[in-house]
Image (spheres, helix red, strand yellow):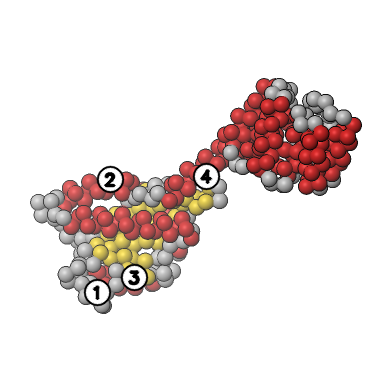
Amino acid sequence: MMAERVVESGKATNGGGEAEKSLKDKGNEFFKAGNYLKAAALYTQAIKLDPSNATLYSNRAAAFLSLVKLSKALADADTTIKLNPQWEKGYFRKGCVLEAMEKYEDALAAFEMALQHNPKSTEVSRKIKRLGQLQKDKQRAQELETLRSNVDMAKHLESFKSEMSDTYGTEDCWKEMFAFIVETMETAVKSWHETSKVDTRVYFLLDKEKTQTDKYAPAVNIDKAFQSPDTHSNCFTYLRQYAEESFSKAACLVTPKSSISYPQVWKGQGSRKWKLGQNDGIFVQFESPSIRKVWFIPSSNEKGQTLCREPQALDIGAHEILPRIFKEKSISS
């Protein structure tokens, strides 16, 4: 850690003899040479000779700070303030220690006190400006971590939930399908947050009574599906057959945008024009006999953290990643 400014040579002293001065001067020399341990030891000897000298505590606080002995540095800064409350240096030292402790709000308060006692100090003014930005950065980092760890897709899918309820009425199956899409989305987003990637897969909501679970898995990897029109067509044919033979109730495609060579649905014009920027993200396409939906979950990088944004519903007629997997079926009222 870099030392905070040079130690004081004689300001705000309250007495002491030649021996104390000699020890302090030697301590200052060692401090300037970067030998903070020796400097702290010499300041300690000087303090024993002149225990009410605020400058000595201020200098030792600077030495302890450079040694990353933060608790001791903070105690010396507080003693400096107690001995000479009108001297800005004690508050400055305290602010520097609190900054090192990443207690930015408290550090800012200490620097503001220092500025009150010395309004012309450009050094303190720079600290206040920097600490204000650090505090904002820390707060934003905490907000990002909260967003990353508390993934709740259900709150973003209320309109889809209402659509399913309107379509299926009192049938309980829509609740199962809604829980299926929410879980699939949340799993994808959490994986993206942790690894910045998701596997290209189609998840199936299997029928607990009809599906032969030893033959049909709830997820199918389709990592090569979007390499070309041919692989896309072959994959779609396979998935349609899989959905039918497994008696699946619904399916959900999850794929990162960056893995799609075909079809690049974000390159259309007119009604197909893409409005969600060039960033990578996750496509999620829900398939069932009665309802089809597609979303794009944009991703961004902020403060070194990958963050998925709110899922954006797309026009499936313009931006479908796969054609219809299930045979269309309308719900009779």
Label 3: element kind: strand
Which residue is labeled 4 in the image?
A: 141
- Which residue type does callout 1 highlight? Thr
- Which residue type does callout 2 highlight? Glu
> Compared to 199, does 146 lie above or below?
above
Observer able to see residue 7: no
Lower sequence index among marks 1 and 4: 4
Which residue is labeled 1 in the image?
A: 213
Q: With 19 as the anchor, is 231 left or right in this view?
A: left
Q: With 221 as the anchor, is 4 left or right in this view?
A: right
Question: Looking at the image, which is closer to me, 18 or 243?
Answer: 18
Q: With 330 as the anchor, is 105 left or right in this view?
A: right
Lower sequence index among marks 1 and 3: 1
Label 2: element kind: helix
> Compared to 16, does 307 lie above or below?
below
Distance (Cα) linking label 1 and label 3: 13 Å
Q: Work out which residue is located at the far bottom of the displayed protein and give it.
A: 215
On the image, the x and y values in percent for residue 219 come to 32, 68
Label 4: element kind: helix
Question: Looking at the image, which is closer to me, 46 or 78?
Answer: 46
The nearer-to-camera label among 4 and 2 is: 4
The tag on residue 57 is: none
Distance (Cα) linking label 2 and label 1: 32 Å
Lower sequence index among marks 4 and 3: 4
The tag on residue 220 is: 3
Residue ID at (69%, 34%):
77
